[in-house]
Amino acid sequence: MYSKFAIILMKYLFLFVFGIIAGTAVYGQNIVMNSDLEDVNICDEHLARCSPAGWFYFKADPAGYLNPGSNNKTISASGIHHFNLLAASEQDSTRDYWQTKLLCSVEPGKKYTLSVKVSAPWANPNLGDIGFWFTNRFIYASKDTLLQPNNFVGLLDAKIKSMKNGWFLINKEFTVSDTASVLVIGNFTKEKNSDIILKRHRDIQPISIFIDDIQINCDKASPCIVNPNLKDSLYALKRRHSKVEPAKPVIVETIPVLLHDTLIVKTAHQVDTISINSIQFALDDARITDKSVKKMLSVLTDKKGAIEKLEVIGYTDDLGTEEHNYELSKNRAASAIKLLVEEIGIDPKIISVRGEGISKRFEKKDLNRRVDIFIYWK
């Protein structure tokens, strides 16, 4: 007859051996991958910071992965990255969602502790705008989506602690009804977006919420077995733009000699890339002064009707502070948009814009002072 101590010892010895064979046994640790969002995915298509490593956006083109700007409300709770989720917009019935695979599954009946930091760009965040849904599969969608599951974990009854720069620390204990391996974050409320806007009397559109430092801690008394290869396999998935196929850049001979290092990249999915680089942007300058740029972009004049979307992204070299370069990169992108709208006649409604701040893609610093324009054809 085994003693009680021997039985306990054999139990934990079994768990230890099983952990070596199948994975690592985790007691009371965070099971969210890349929880501070600081590990960055450099997507193969754009060679830019497209998303947090191990996290996935629902539609073809990731959005809402932010760096700090001059406005305090956009400073991350920690580090330099955080999510921006679209909670509701009166003009759109859909919402934003981010998802990742948990390091080990949540199980029914076990207690978990949720911790997350939230903020909002214009006012204190409304905790009704964010929920955590645990499911067993990744959600794939080529277009914007509306998810309204019945069993998500809401935060209206959570504990709240005020932090600096407009951030709040949210804590909540919860259990789940089913085993689940995937975490989805977003606004899952049953209300229509238009009703949410009307109820809050919002003049500023849309309603967004910032998210950082996501932790889900399992029960200290109950181990979960972590697959040692899971993180590496998800970090290896670098593609984030389903419409874009990587292709070897080719120099288009019709481009003026002064723009010899401007590239148009053509792919099987009808996406072209135009890069306006250092010929146009002097050090610490956002002005486009080279008249040949207008001539180069004029090739789009007769093709405006065939363009579905333009994505304009500004970059800088690594001289100066990150905050300054972030603003400069946005101003460079804005200069390109002004040219596209006023000189070429592109409809501003089909243009999306963002600044990515510092780029180190090229060894020569001046080549990183550029704007990339991604053209999505119908």
Image (cartoon, helix red, strand yellow):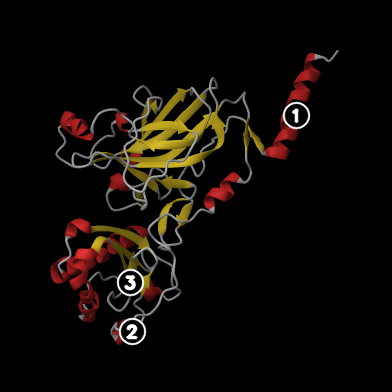
| Marks 2, 3: nearer the viewer | 2
Disc 1 from disc 2: Cα separation:
67 Å
In the drawing, does residue 337 fall left or right of residue 140?
Answer: left
Q: Residue furthest bottom?
A: 257
Q: Amino acid at mark 1?
A: Phe
Q: Which residue is mark 2?
A: 253
22 or 119, nearer to the observer: 22
Of pointers 3 and 1, the one earlier in the residue sequence: 1
Of pointers 2 and 3, the one earlier in the residue sequence: 2
In the drawing, does residue 219 fall left or right of residue 152?
Answer: right
Label drawn at residue 275: 3
Depicted 168 relative to depicted 346: above or below: above
Rendered location of residue 260, percent (x, y): 34, 83
Q: Which residue is mark 1?
A: 14
Secondary element at tag 3: strand
Of pointers 1 and 2, the one earlier in the residue sequence: 1
